[in-house]
Amino acid sequence: MYFITYKARASIKIPVTKASRYKHTYKKSINQPTTIVPTLAQTSSDTTLRKVPIIYDILGTSTRPKIYPNSAMTKWKKAVESLAKKYPSEVYINGQTKNKVVALTFDDGPDPVNTPKIIKVLRSNNVQGTFFCIGEQIESCKSIIKQAYDNGDVIANHSWSHKDFTTINESEIKNEVTLTENEISNVIGKRSTLIRPPYGDINEDAQNSLTALNYKSVIWSTDTLDWEQREASNIVKNVVNNVRPGEIILMHCNEDKKATTEALPQTISKLKQMGYSFVTVDKLLHVSAYK
């Protein structure tokens, strides 16, 4: 068998107005006998299997005028890919699997309008997702968080107020993370170990702060661009045309993401037809969802 290494492409953030974005807005698995080229994995009891993470391109396109220019996207891609290579057990772009399994993730909730609809779609399709929640919104949506948790969805951390972690200090990051962790615990009685840095922006200092707090950083390998091109057809296309085993799919569930809610049933249906099944991020990455 053999494994293919992907280069990474990505969409990124440069300073933009609140209205212009969403709300606040690896190598190969190798057996390496001396006579074997190290890009091939040999199945043999006499060799040792050494796994190294494969890092996917970050895919997804939009026909809308770009919020982020290509130069900024490239800069972000290089930064997050570098961190994922340096800290393969702390920063994740995608899962490591040959099986047709994906994780649906939803940012910027909870929201009283779209989040319950998304939870309902997931439940009716016997699918679980991962919700990266903004802490300051949890108090007013506690019943929605509880509903998602009872459905088997994972409740994860997306900071308290969606501040860019690369622009604030360690103390501020700790405050953003801990306040949200406490709110989640108040609702479901558990403390998350998974975090998605706002905007996917992360650097080494921020990651060190998150590691000290016992968190794994989860980015994404497919961006549906539902925050830029809010059309169900484009959201579905970005997922179906780009899906790979171990995909982490970025969507949103806050108040202006009606198109995401509309796209979700078709997205799930088409992926099932392609032979894909769905898991929460913790199961995809083989890490704990909660402390």
Image: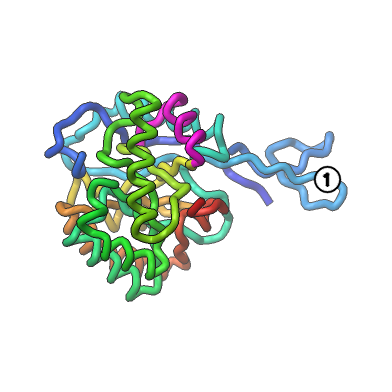
User: At label 1, which amino acid type do we have?
Assistant: Thr
Residue 111 visible to an observer of this rendering: yes
* Residue bounds of the magenta highlight: 200-214
Q: Residue furthest bottom?
A: 124
Q: Which residue appears at 40% of the width and 26% of the height?
A: 170
For residue 3, side relative to residue 260 (left or right): right
Magenta span includes 94: no
| Residue 274 in the image, given as x and y percentages of width and height | 43, 66
| Residue 181 in the image, given as x and y percentages of width and height | 38, 47
SS of the residue at dot 1?
Answer: loop
Q: Which residue appears at 16% of the width and 61% of the height?
A: 113
For residue 222, side relative to residue 263 (left or right): right
Q: In this rendered view, identify the residue nearer to me: 267 or 147.
A: 147
Pointer 1 residue: 47
Locate residue 262: give its quadrant. bottom left
Residue 74 visible to an observer of this rendering: no
Q: In this rendered view, identify the residue nearer to me: 15 or 166.
A: 166
Badge 1, how many Cα within 10 Å: few under 14, some, many 20+?
A: few
Locate residue 9: give its quadrant. top left
